[in-house]
Amino acid sequence: MYKKIIAVLTIAAATLLISAPAAHAHYVRYSWDPGCGPIGMSQCGYSSVSKTHKTVYACDTYADGVGLWTKYVRSDGVSGIVKDGNGSKSGCGKYTAPSGKYIDRIRPCRNHGSYITCLEKWKYIE
């Protein structure tokens, strides 16, 4: 009798595990908005992280000669910068974390040539 109860409980537990919903990954975007243009009302660009939280992007969207970079910190504490190397043209700069690591937080920065400004708050990737 106990074997039947254990078998039923095992099947029930397996069914719950199989039908449990997976954690939902999501795309994260952090815009430098507004701040560009003649009166500062246009979007300068944005930093983003892929749904898998493995790839980080830097996208400059305003042609003003000031580049957009993304500062990031990985899950292992290693930090870095992604640069949009083509200015506001189509395409963004990107970096993909190595296997077993993911992007923990990001923040957009603007490269003015002689100095860099970054948004004060980090956006944590949850």
Image (spheres, rainbow, N blue to C red):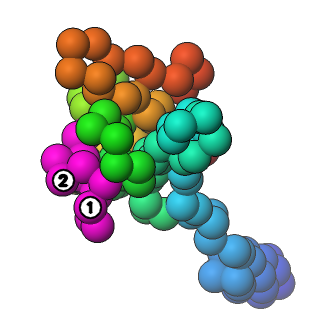
Q: Is residue 65 left or right of residue 22?
A: left
Name the residue beneath numbered marker 1.
89
Residue at the spot 70% in from the left edge and 83% down from the top edge: 19
The residue lying toward the viewer, choosing from 107 and 62, is 62
Up/down of 102 relative to 66, above or below? below
Residue 72 at least partly seen: no
Dot 1: what SS? loop
Residue 4 lies, with reference to residue 28, above or below; the image says below
Would residue 18 be visible to someone looking at this image?
Answer: yes
Q: Are marks 2 and 1 in contact (CB under 8 Å)?
A: yes
Amino acid type indicated by mark 2: Asn
From the viewer's perspective, is residue 37 above or below residue 15?
A: above
Where is residue 116 drawn, in percent x and y? 32, 17
Q: Quadrant of the C terminus?
A: top right
Q: Nearer the viewer, residue 106 or 30?
A: 30
Q: Residue at left 17%, top 47%?
A: 85
Q: Position of residue 72 (x, y in %)?
A: 36, 32
* Residue 36 vertical position relative to residue 120 in the rendered view, above or below: below
Q: Identify the residue at horizontal 29%, vertical 23% (top origin).
A: 112
Verify whether residue 97 appears in magenta: no
Report the quarter where the N terminus lies: bottom right
Label 2: element kind: loop
The kind of residue tagged 1 is Lys
Q: Main secondary structure of the magenta part?
A: loop
Which of 93/45 is in front?
45
Q: How far across and how far down the image is residue 12, in percent?
A: 77, 82
List the residue tagged with mark 2: 86
Instruction: Tell me the magenta residue range.
Output: 82-96
Q: Position of residue 26 (x, y in %)?
A: 58, 62
Real-space Cα distance between discs 2 and 1? 6 Å
Which residue is at a point 55% across and 47% down the rendered structure image?
A: 43
